[in-house]
Structures are given as C-alpha cells and as structure tokens.
Amino acid sequence: MEEAEQDENVVTGTFSLSCGLVTVLFDTGAHQLAKARDEIEAMRAAREKDFQEFVNKQAEMEATLLDHHEKQRVEQERIHWSRRSA
C-alpha cells in the first residue's frame, strides 16, 4: 500500500460502503502508455531506417543500370562507326 501511494501513476481513495470504509487503488496506466509510445517510436525509427536503406540501394541500382545502358550505347555506336569505316 505504501509503495502504491508513492507511485505517481496510482491514485488511492477511501470510499464509504454499507459495510464500512474501503480503500481502493486506481492505476492510471500512464507508465504502460509511455512504454508503448517508446516502443512504437523505436519501431517507427527502425522502419524509417530500413526505408532509407532501401531508397539508397534503389538509387545505387538505378545509377548502375544507367551506367550500363550508357556503356552499351557507346559500344553499339562504336561498332556502327567501325562497320561504316570498313
């Protein structure tokens, strides 16, 4: 009871019932909400990090593909001009 009274998330109250006075503890659950919020924020941060890694990898792959296409175009042009010269 003393421990509960020191917890800021717990409210105590005394009520009068027909059988006498009754002490009741009410737990606001605020500590659970804060913990859940922290967990959600951690998951959100991890998801954002994963998404950024995905975007960076996509950009890298697109740059590689564009570079490959450009090399292929240059090679085809070289072959075209070498055939015309022959």
Image (spheres, helix red, strand yellow):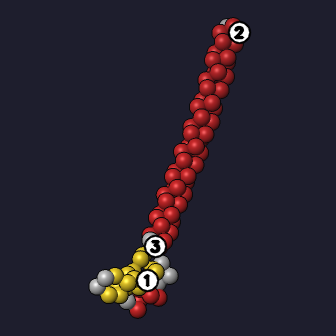
Give the percent coordinates (x, y) of residue 79.
Answer: 64, 15
Residue at the image point whose x is 61% and y is 39% from the top? 59
Q: Is residue 82 above or below residue 45?
A: above
Name the outermost residue toward the front. 18
In the rendered view of the protein, which quadrant contains the N terminus? bottom left
Residue closer to the observer: 17 or 14: 17
In the rendered view of the protein, which quadrant contains the C terminus? top right
Cα–Cα span, label 2 and label 3 = 87 Å
Residue at the image point whose x is 34% and y is 82% from the top? 17
Binning the other alpha carbons within 10 Å of mark 2 as few (below 14), some (14 to 19) or many (20 upward) gives few
Cα–Cα span, label 1 and label 2 = 100 Å
Residue bearing the label numbered 1: 13
Q: Is residue 33 above or below residue 75?
A: below
Residue bearing the label numbered 2: 85
Question: From the viewer's perspective, is 28 left or right of 53?
Answer: left
Cα–Cα span, label 3 and label 1 = 13 Å
Name the outermost residue toward the bottom. 2
Residue bearing the label numbered 3: 28
Q: Earlier in the sequence, mark 1 or mark 2?
A: 1
Q: Secondary structure at mark 3?
A: loop
In the picture, the disc for residue 57 is none
Which three-letter amino acid code belongs to the residue tagged 1? Gly
Which three-letter amino acid code belongs to the residue tagged 2? Ser
Residue at the image point whose x is 52% and y is 55% from the top? 44
Front: mark 2 or 3: 3
Q: Earlier in the sequence, mark 2 or mark 3?
A: 3
Residue closer to the observer: 69 or 56: 56
